[in-house]
Image: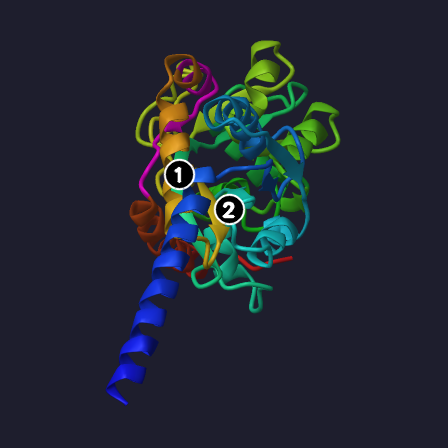
Amino acid sequence: MVKNLMRWTTALTGSALLLAAAGATQAQSYPSRAVRIVIPFAPGGGTDNLTRIMAPKLTELLGQQFLIDNRPGASGQIGTELVARAVPDGYTIAHVDTSFTSNPSLYRKLPYDAVKDFAPISVLASAPVVLMIHPSVPVKSLKELVTLAKSRPGELNFATGGTGSATHLGVELFKSAVGLDLVHIPYKGSGPAAAAVLAGHVVMTFASPSATAQFLAAGKLRALAVTGDKRNTAMPQVPTFVESGIRGVDSGTYWVALAPAGTPRDTIATLHGAMAKVLQLPDVRQRLMGLGFEPIAGTPEEAAAHVREAIAKWAKVVAQAKIRSD
């Protein structure tokens, strides 16, 4: 009996060692093929711009292609669900924005659990959102826009990157702060929303600096105010809402990299290490900051804490501002 037990224990120990060795080999070889980064928004927005700057550098650093897959729709839910259901091997990950943490408060039922179904990799960057209008609108300042909107209740419209996005929350907070009646028109990302304003189909939008900097510089859009407690380095001429006399418009964007829950910790560590290195590269930092991003590269633990805290924060904002999903 004792001999049999010893043989069984020895066999288990041997199997455990083999499994551990196999796991170590797998971790050391990751990635051994292309990695897909799912962006749950249309091209041209902040998430897309950030990822397209990072992806080639990740490819250089880890020796495998990092491919971008735009899957817009349902305020980011379609692409995000795809990642939640993916095999947790590190070969399908997501880059999400603030809508990921506001959606749990805006939608009674999501096709995934924002905490349980994901393994956070890193908080990649942050940026304010900017209120901008089409140049044909006869206002030059935020104060003038408020006066115009109050004189025409229910007539002026605004485009956003989707219900629950930072751009949507920003405008809703703006409406609440000054008592405006504006019409919401959601799009599948801040890029298409900005394009609608550029074409003159919509009066105004909130967008990340990266999605609109070139149009502002060319005079095709007019920026009136930026969120945050200080002016943004990419557009220092644009005053903050507080400078313009309006408080309470506390909306900005944070971008987070996520993997499916159950992804090996060594794989998460490899991805985080590579992302942190890329975000510290001088040329990458210069490009990102020139577009209004603030690189962060938080640890997986910090990213997990950020997700939990942001979900709680936006739950309060959504309730106080009485924001409802469309």
Task: Check the image and report above or below for 147 versus 284.
Answer: below
Name the residue furthest front: 3
**What residue is shown at x 51% (from left), y 37% (from top)?**
31
**What residue is shown at x 45% (from left), y 15% (from top)?**
290
Magenta region includes residue 149: no
> What's drawn in magenta, residue-wise?
286-299
Q: Quadrant of the C terminus?
A: bottom right
Q: Amino acid at mark 2?
A: Gly
Q: Which residue is mark 2?
A: 90
Q: Based on the displayed image, in which of its 4 quarters is residue 273 positioned?
A: top left
Query: Which one is nearer the viewer's eye here, 214 or 237?
Result: 214
Residue 223 drawn at (x, y percent): 52, 22
User: Is there a contact, CB below 8 Å, between mark 1 and mark 2?
Assistant: yes
Earlier residue among tags 1 and 2: 2
Name the residue furthest top: 218
Query: Which one is nearer the viewer's eye here, 272 or 43?
Result: 272
Q: Is residue 181 visible?
A: yes
Task: Check the image and report above or below for 235 versus 85.
Answer: above
Label 1 secondary element: helix
Name the residue furthest left: 2
Task: Check the image and report above or below for 254 versus 89.
Answer: above
Residue 74 drawn at (x, y percent): 66, 53
Residue 116 drawn at (x, y percent): 44, 64
Q: Is residue 157 visible?
A: no
Name the residue furthest bottom: 1
Residue 202 drawn at (x, y percent): 70, 33
**Circle 2 residues within 10 Å: few <14, some 14–19, many ≥20:** many
Q: Which residue is mark 1?
A: 270
Q: Amino acid at mark 1?
A: Thr
